[in-house]
Amino acid sequence: MSDGDDSLVNPEVKAIWSEVLEVEPLDAASDFFELGGHSLLAVRLLARIEEEVGWAVPLSLLFAHPTLGDFCAEASAAAAS
């Protein structure tokens, strides 16, 4: 997966990341943990994504794919299956 490919980024998920991390701007290469994310914020992030986007994904997916582009690609695939 190419971290720099902004076409992989879901705009709703990007907005949630930005709000939870209180960071702008974000792009596909933005890393949740490098931007100050931690486990409690990760739980908050995933709860909002499930509520607002409908993707129920495990916390482990964010740890395995911490960049916005990779996370969006993997989470949308996981939610579709």
Image (tube, rainbow, N blue to C red):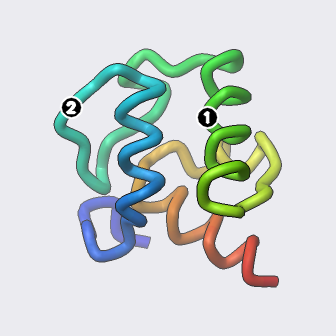
Please tell me which residue lies in front, 64 or 43.
Answer: 43
* Disc 1, SS: helix
Is 2 placed above or below 53 here? below
In which quadrant is the N terminus drawn?
A: bottom left
Q: CA distance from mark 2 to mark 1?
A: 16 Å
Q: Residues within 10 Å of mark 1 (few under 14, many from 20)?
A: many
| Quadrant in which the C terminus appears | bottom right
| In-front residue for pair 26/12 | 12
Query: Residue 19 appears at what percent x and percent y?
Result: 40, 29
Percent x, y for residue 7?
Answer: 29, 76
Going by the numbered disc 1, the residue's amino acid type is: Leu
Residue 2 location, quadrant? bottom left
**Residue plotted at (37% across, 45% down):** 15
Residue on which disc 1 sits = 45
Q: 79 or 65, which is in the foreground?
A: 79
Q: Is residue 36 above or below residue 45?
A: above
Question: Seen from this angle, which residue lies furthest bottom?
Answer: 81
Residue at position x 51%, y 63% in the image:
72
Q: Residue furthest left?
A: 25
Please state if 19 lies on the left or on the right of 56 as rendered. left
Asked which quadrant contains residue 22, the reply is top left
Q: Check the image and report above or below for 50 versus 81.
A: above
Q: Judging from the image, what secondary structure is the residue with disc 2 in?
A: loop
Q: Is residue 48 left or right of residue 37?
A: right
Q: Position of residue 47 (x, y in %)?
A: 72, 38
Q: Earlier in the sequence, mark 2 or mark 1?
A: 2
Residue 49 left/right relative to 12: right
Residue type at mark 2 is Glu
The tally of labels here is 2
Rendered location of residue 45, percent (x, y)? 61, 34
Q: Which residue is mark 2?
A: 24
